Image (cartoon, rainbow, N blue to C red):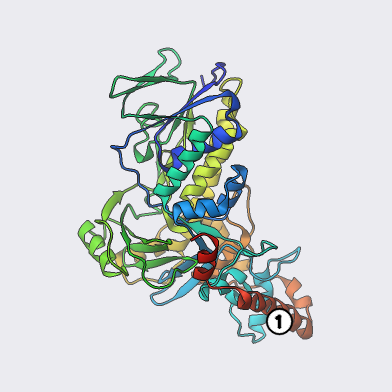
Amino acid sequence: MQTNDTVVKKVVIAGGGTAGWMTAAALSSLIGKNIDITLIESDDIPVVGVGEATIPPLLTFHRLLKIDEQEFMKATQATFKLGISFENWRATGHEYFHSFGTTGQDCWAATFHNFWLKAKNDGYSDSFDAYCLEIQAARKNKFARLADNSINYAYHLDATKYAGFLRTIAERKGVTRREGLINRVEQHLESGNIKSLHLKDGGIVDGDLFIDCTGFRGLLIEQTLNAGYEDWSHWLPCDKAVAVQTESQGEMKPYTRSVAHDSGWRWRIPLQNRVGNGLVYCSKTMSDEMARQTLLENIEGKALNEPRVIPFKAGRRRKTWMKNCVAIGLSSGFIEPLESTSIHLIQRAIIRLMQLFPTQGIKAPDIAEFNRQSESETNFIRDFIILHYKVTQRTDSQFWRYCKEMDVPDTLQRRIELFSRCGRVFREDVDLFFENSWVQVMMGQGITPEQYHPIADLMSPAEQKAFLGGIRKSVDQVVEKLPSHEQFLKSYCS
């Protein structure tokens, strides 16, 4: 039975880090007036702490918690992020940009890429990127927060400092932090629900609802409740990452760099005080030592710490809410950080939990709905990440040949064929990524649709010229007036 009529008054969060303190801050700030919240973490357990790039929905999360942006950015040494530069993904030496903004102007029947494809057939030479404000600003290292919110952005941040920043908010709202190692999970004999967490120092923490933020190990959701794991490594074969921090060197760019290599990809994330670097790779085609060496050969600036290897397995828990336990963060599954979705999935799980919060007792329909939405949302993100690997022209290594030839989920294959053959793309259900994101990545990876929507043919040559020219002019005028990213940071949140 997945029903428990006990009124939820005591919430216990197992684990800190980004997931634990985001959960604690949100629950205590938004629905915590009548519930007692305890978070258990140990200083002896290191956090993964490399999820340093975010996407725009985090701004909504911060507004809900009434977080002051300048205060947050100063505390976390954050910089602004307009998107991701993908280098060597389509082919060695090729680069494209996935931005957070819109490109051009859509109409009721078709998205902008249809009008651009028609113009390209008519001899226009402007790139698709020329019509995107965020891309043009990023490539010129410019940024500003505009009064009309016309620039879409996210952040690069220090994940460890972010957890500390949220901890301050949570404790101010009444959350109790308990230092200690969990060495036993006690369950109710009849229901199997979690009753309490026993600590190494002898302490016992009882609760009505338990949040598992214990990372990859999934101490509650997996080791105790055996939720099961859906393995996606046949679609996402990278299974390790090596990370290192370096001194800042050169200009702080307002975007993340994702550079493909023979067996995966590496990231570069600029913060105000340092740079986060990492290399994601497939252990079947690259050794740990080779990964470490490849990363160190490609960093800029002095390394500030020893590179550390982080093993992982792409996939998701078959159930992220079981009995009286909800898994949030890495305990719920892992999709590699290629599109910076890790913190977003934490945020979505928290919002979903608050929408379905079991104030009057845990009910089976709430659990089923939580798990249904979680599965649907992660599947869409999974497909979007697989797209980057599958649609490639690279055949220069065993890894890339495998990716190019592998079978992919039917849901993704359908979208690839719809765009390739018909030029159409639609946002579905709870898909995180809008049409423009799919278009930017599919065309960036090398798909040119065989046709465009006939509505583009209704424009006369003069109308087409005015339409495209007006958009391009508007983008160029805004970018021209923007300060450099570094100038804005120094005046806003240094």
Tag count in the figure?
1
Can the viewer see residue 410?
no
Can the viewer see residue 266?
yes
* Residue where numbered disc 1 is placed: 469
Residue furthest out toward the bottom: 123
In screen coordinates, is 131 left or right of 313? Answer: right
Reply above or below: 240 against 446.
Answer: above
* Residue 237 position in % (x across, y down): 35, 54
Residue 400 versus residue 493: which sits nearer the camera? 493
Residue 418 versus residue 302: which sits nearer the camera? 302
Q: Considering the numbered disc 1 on the image, is that residue within a helix, a strand or a loop?
A: helix
Residue shown at 60% from the left, 27% from the top: 33
* Residue 494 position in % (x across, y down): 48, 61
* Residue 141 position in % (x across, y down): 51, 73
* Residue 215 position in % (x across, y down): 38, 39
Residue shown at 42% from the left, 48% from the top: 161
Reply above or below: 29 against 453.
Answer: above
Reply above or below: 372 against 249.
Answer: above
Residue 284 versus residue 17: which sits nearer the camera? 17
- For residue 186, which quarter of the picture? top left
- For residue 478, which quarter of the picture? bottom right
Residue shown at 44% from the left, 58% from the top: 338
Residue furthest out toward the left: 289
Reply above or below: 220 against 303.
Answer: above
Residue type, numbered disc 1:
Gly
In screen coordinates, is 149 left or right of 138? Answer: right
Residue shown at 33% from the left, 20% from the top: 203
